Amino acid sequence: MSETSQSPETPRSPDAPETSENRLRKELPEEVRAEEARARENPESPDAEAEPSKPVLTGRQRLVKGLWPPRVSRAQFIVALLLFGLGFGLAVQVASNSDSDGALRGARQEDLVRILDELDDRTQRLEEEKQGLEDQRTELENSSDQAEEARKQTVEKEKQLGILAGTVAAQGPGITLTIGDEKGTVEADMLLDAIQELRAAGAEAIQVNGVRVVAGTYLTDVSGGVAVDGNKISAPYRFKVIGKPQDLEPALNIPGGVVQTLEKEQATVTVERSDKIIVDALRPAKRPDYARSSSQ
C-alpha cells in the first residue's frame, strides 16, 4: 500500500472561512511573523523572551520621539538668538512709531487742518523759491547786458547769504518767542527743537538773547542756563525770528510740538506777532582754512 506524503500546511480554500489567527498573520509584517515562528521553535531562547516585552512604536510616536527632547546645535542656537534680537528691535521700532503718532491720532480736527495748512504753506514756499530761481535764469539768458544783470544778482545773493550767515543785520515781519523757566527745567535740546521747528516753518533769521543763530550753531547745557555757541544765556529765553508770522506761530503750536513740550516741563511760552522784527546780532565772517572757490 503506497503512502501519500502531505505538506505541513494544507492550502486554505478560497471559500473557507477566514479565522482570526489567519487574519492576524496576514496583517502582521513578514519580520514579525518570522520572529514568532522562531520563538515557537525555541521557546527557551532569551531573544524570544526579550522581544515580546519591547513595545512597537507607531509612526506618530516615532515622530514625537525624534522631535523631543530637541537637539540644538551651536549654529542653530546663534541663528535663533539673532532672529530673536531682530524681532525685538522691530517691536521696539513699531512701538516708538506708535508713540510718535499718538499725538496726531488724538488731535482735534481743527489741529489736523492747521497741520495740513502748514504743510501746504511749506510746499508753496518751495514752489515760489523754485520759480524765483527759474526767473533769474531766464533773465540772465534774455538780458542784453548779461554781465550787468549777473552783477546785480550777485550783489543780491551776497546780501541774502550775509543774512543766512549772520554777518549782516536783518529786519522784517516775524514773531517774538519768549520762554520763561522759573523751575529750571528747560534744557538745551528743547531750545534746539524750537530752532529747528522755526527753520522748518521758513524762518530766515533767528536771534536768541543777543546771540545770532546760524547753520553751525550748537547748544549745550551749563550751570544756571544754556550756552549758545559757547555764549551762556539764561531765562527768560527770547527768540527774535524773521519770517512769515502766519507760518511760524502755528508751527510752534502743533499738537505735541514745541509749546506743548515746554508747558509739560512747567515752562511758560508766549508768542507775539510783529510786522517789524530787527535781528541785529552779528557773527564775524570766518575765512575757511582749506576751502577755496572753484570758479575761474
Image (cartoon, rainbow, N blue to C red):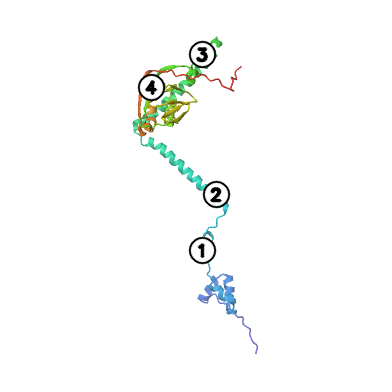
Cα distance, mark 4 to mark 1?
79 Å
Residue 149: percent from left, percent from top: 53, 11
Q: Earlier in the sequence, mark 2 or mark 1?
A: 1
Q: Earlier in the sequence, mark 2 or mark 3?
A: 2
Please name whichever residue, 296 or 169, is drawn nearer the observer in this view of the structure: 169
Q: Earlier in the sequence, mark 3 or mark 1?
A: 1
Are discs 4 and 2 less than 8 Å apart at CB? no
- Residue ID for mark 4: 175
As displayed, is residue 38 above or below residue 217? below
Q: Quadrant of the C terminus?
A: top right
Q: Sort mark 2 into few (<14), some (14-19) or many (20+) by Cα contacts within 10 Å.
A: few
Cα distance, mark 4 to mark 2?
56 Å
Q: Earlier in the sequence, mark 4 or mark 2?
A: 2
State which mark lies toward you, 4 or 2: 4
- Residue ID for mark 2: 79
Q: Sort mark 4 into few (<14), some (14-19) or many (20+) by Cα contacts within 10 Å.
A: many
Res 4 → quadrant? bottom right
Q: Name the mark on residue 61.
A: 1
